[in-house]
């Protein structure tokens, strides 16, 4: 059928492309917003993952208590377990690592440790000096010039001599109290306000008393104590190298 009103038909014809154009443009705008929204969502997820990787600490292998341990108890192998937990580096450094089982088994706790707590050095008693069975560690005062010029140090082996305080007319030789004694520790008594050197240019430390802690058996300790109270006690460094002169 033909169009009865020619003017209206022409307007309808002109309006049809315009309506199609507007519809097409509207569709393009919707698609663009979806793409932008999806991109923002992806960026948000990536930012979240990156933030968590920076905030959440790495997995650390540490020692954990499996049951309540009272204060003063000796730690047994079944009291601890190796666990993997997420800890900051500072906390992981303060706790015992999973490879430190041998360091804690057999040690005595200083405080109560609850089950699930991580093991730390502060939970144990401070280790004391160990003395072998049948041995004593005896500390005696000596003058530096009687202790190999003050050159004696921990780990050295020394000979301990004793000589009377008052010599008779005929010189009496010194007696050997201990033929071999291991030096455990050495110390000097520092006078307050001392300045390092004397007027003669000699170090003041050479005139300061020196004490030595020796590892002895009980009989040797008794002899050294008696001699230190009534006689002059001297110590001298002893070489532990084998004597090769007889083998030449």
Image (spheres, helix red, strand yellow):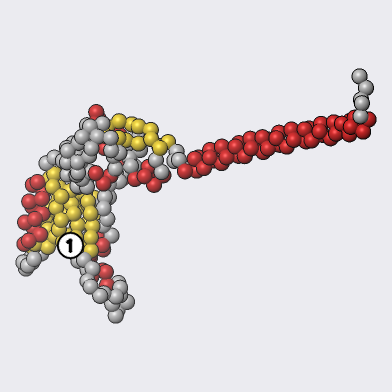
Q: Is 79 on the left or on the right of 201, as rendered?
A: left
The residue lying at 53 percent from left, 40 percent from top is: 48
Judged left or right of residue 212, residue 98 is right
Residue at the location (92% across, 33% down)?
A: 7
Q: Is residue 247 above or below residue 207?
A: above
In this orientation, does residue 99 appear? no
Residue 94, percent from left and from top: 34, 45
Residue marked by disc 1: 142
Q: In which quarter of the image is residue 63?
A: top left
Dividing the picture into quadrants, the one containing residue 32 is top right
Q: Which residue lies furthest to the top in this view?
A: 1
Quadrant location, the N terminus? top right
- Quadrant assignment for the C terminus: top left
Q: In which quarter of the image is residue 25?
A: top right
User: Looking at the picture, how far across and down is residue 14, in whole percent?
Assistant: 89, 34
Asked whether, in this view, residue 136 is left or right of residue 23, the answer is left
Question: Do we see residue 232 in this rendering?
Answer: yes
Residue at image position (22%, 51%) is 184
Considering every residue shown, the one lying at the far front of the view is: 4
Instruction: Please tell me which residue lies in front, 110 or 47.
Output: 47
**At 40% across and 37% down in the image, what residue appears?**
86
- Against 144, residue 47 (above or below) is above
| Residue 93 image point, x, y percent | 37, 44
Mark 1, other Cα within 10 Å: few <14 / some 14–19 / many ≥20: many
Q: Give the vertical position of 25 relative to 94 (above or below).
A: above
Instruction: Provide the secondary structure element on which disc 1 rests.
Output: strand
Front residue of 129 and 127: 127
């Amino acid at each position: 059928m033909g169009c009865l009103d020619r003017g209206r038909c022409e307007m309808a014809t002109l309006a049809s492309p315009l309506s199609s154009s507007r519809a097409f443009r509207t569709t393009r705008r919707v698609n663009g917003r979806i793409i932008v929204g999806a991109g923002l969502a992806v960026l948000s997820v990536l930012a979240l993952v990156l933030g968590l990787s920076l905030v959440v600490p790495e997995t650390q292998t540490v020692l954990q208590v499996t049951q309540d341990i009272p204060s003063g108890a000796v730690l047994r192998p079944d009291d601890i377990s190796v666990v993997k937990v997420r800890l900051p580096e500072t906390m992981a450094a303060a706790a015992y690592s999973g490879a430190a089982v041998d360091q804690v088994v057999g040690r005595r706790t200083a405080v109560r440790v609850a089950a699930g707590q991580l093991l730390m050095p502060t939970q144990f008693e401070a280790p004391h000096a160990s003395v072998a069975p049948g041995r004593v560690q005896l500390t005696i005062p000596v003058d530096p010039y009687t202790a190999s010029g003050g050159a004696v140090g921990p780990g050295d082996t020394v000979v301990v001599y004793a000589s009377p305080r008052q010599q008779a007319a005929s010189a009496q030789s010194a007696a050997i109290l201990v033929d071999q004694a291991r030096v455990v520790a050495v110390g000097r008594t520092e006078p307050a306000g001392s300045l390092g050197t004397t007027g003669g240019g000699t170090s003041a430390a050479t005139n300061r008393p020196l004490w030595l802690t020796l590892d002895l058996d009980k009989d040797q300790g008794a002899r050294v104590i008696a001699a230190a109270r009534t006689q002059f006690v001297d110590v001298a460094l002893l070489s532990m190298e084998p004597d090769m002169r007889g083998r030449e």
